[in-house]
Amino acid sequence: MTSEVGTDLRAVRPCFGLSLAWGCIRGWSKGGAMGNVGDLPMHSLFWLRGRGPGWRLGWLQGWFFGVVGFLGFVGIGRAALAPAARPNVIVILADDMGIGDVSSLNAKCAWKTPGIDRLAREGRTFTDAHSASGVCTPSRYTLLTGRYSWRGKLKSSVLHGYDPALIEPGRLTVAGFLRGQGYATGMVGKWHLGVDWVRTGPKLEEVDFAQSFGGGPISQGFDRFLGISASLDMPPFVFLSQDRSTTVPVDRVAASPGPKMWRAGVIGPDFRHEEVHPRFRREALSWIESRARARAVDGTPFFLYLALASPHTPTVPTPEFVGRTRTNPYGDFVVQVDATVGDILDSLDTLGISRNTLVVFTADNGCSPAANLGELRGFGHDPSAGFRGHKADLFEGGHRVPFLVRWPAEVPAGSMCSRLVGQLDLLATLADILGQRLPSGAAEDSVSFLPQLRRGDRARAGREALVHHSNGGFFALRQGPWKLLFTPDSGGWSDPKPGSKEAARLPKLQLYHLGRDAAERTNRLTDEPKVVRAMTREMRRILVNGRSTPGPVQPYANPGDWPQADPFRTE
Ligand SMILES: [Ca+2]
């Protein structure tokens, strides 16, 4: 398999080379008669006046082909030699997995993750990388659009399986952008961004599953989709293929208790929760193989967004993984996720496309309490690796996630980066890789981390601030080592919870210096009033401008009832 960089461009380079050679010969043979080539070009037209038409035509042809040939030879040569040209892109997104669940990121991890660790060994590990939210839907919106989810209509919490589409029609997504660049785009897994079902009545489940739906992956830039509408614990329990359900569910399944927790709802005849992860794995491997073979023939690169529904609840590792970690079902399920990462890397090797395939592994938010954190502590395991809090929170455990990138053609193996990056930076980064400018109304909060991919901490350009968002719709701003939480509490599910008596006794804001206090224990609010004022101003600027990157102010959903944003909407 040879589908590496620039193959198609190299094929045309000899044409320009021939043009250059012919132009040189033709131009020199005619120009030589001038006796003084150095007179050109200022005097050339004047000098040509005394010559016959045939001579002039030959002379001009020579220079024309010479110049075109030279520019083509140099330009195409540069493009062909730039390994950044059109890598395949695979983004693997785990669901509810902590930074401490990866053995290369946590010396005390209670299990080994050889698949993800291979990415660390062969690529770059980002240690200060974040999902945009502590929960699924807003995190996924932001990853795909490069725009903070809270600028859209969802101001807190998540969608469910029957909710309408969240991504605005016409908004550029990573998939839409790459498709526009000639990529084949595929998604396998959990969408969780709403679809516009054909409804048969006002009740939640009154959906015509025989009809196609709008607003899903196929409407948002993906050529191919196989997956589920929301989390694996949320009905409807049906597989979706392209823009329709693969079956019409007629049965109902009762709610299941944890750790195999799912809600009651309709279920398709071909749907078993335990078989969802294996099916996503098979589908991803099969699509990668078919696209790799297609690229070898037609040069079309591919983008795969593999949005796993695991290790989120229901915690259903398949029999070969049950008991593997000797911890609990969550640990076994994490190891199954890791094995899938390893299988994908192996398949890239087999297909001969590892070198120019950019692979990202990350998670949509931190570990959930549903993993049974107390039980894991008994095994010496902390899914947040010492950071405070967990899924849903503004604390680091909510959104500081594993983020590893392997791209052998461009990224040094075994490298680290401690600079601040976010999943929302994917779109700007891919545009940067492809040398494209994004429209001003797209990816309003996305900053390229290509400099960090190449140079790590030595890179000059990079993200300077990042907004965090919680399940409760609360905000925090990160800037340099400082993190300002605009709440007295976690903003999510860990203590102190929003609205709790404990929170009511605390200062309204929390300021932490993550460089000295990564565990967010000492509130520096009263010590650093200037930092608090400056960061509050910055948060306001980011909100009211409708964007955080340079460019014209952009519209955003700014309803009257948005109490979490009130401190930033008024002077
Ligand atoms: Ca999640």
Image (cartoon, helix red, strand yellow):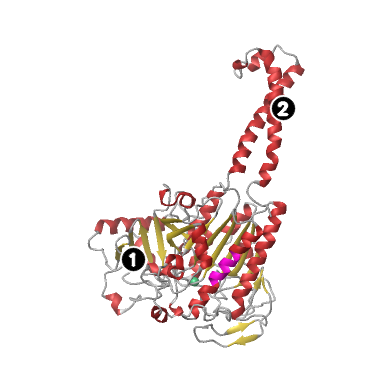
Kind of element beneath mark 1: loop
Q: Looking at the image, which is closer to me, 560 or 189? A: 189
Residue 260 shows which numbered tag?
none
Q: Which mark is residue 22?
A: 2
- Amino acid type at mark 1: Phe
Rounded to the nearest whole Å, what is the CA distance between mark 2 and mark 1? 69 Å
Residue 291 visible within the image: yes
Image location (x, y in percent) of residue 270? 67, 80
Residue at x 65% of width, y 61% of height: 350
User: Mark 2: which amino acid?
Assistant: Trp
Nearer to me, 403 or 138: 403
Total number of numbered labels? 2
- Locate the N terminus and report the quarter of the image it occupies: bottom right
The residue that label 1 is drawn on is 486
Question: Looking at the image, is mark 2 or mark 1 earlier in the sequence?
Answer: 2
Magenta range: 337-344
Instruction: Answer with left or right where residue 52 lies relative to residue 431.
Output: right
Residue neighbourhood size for the residue with mark 1, other residues' Cα within 10 Å, grouped as few (<14), some (14–19), many (≥20): many
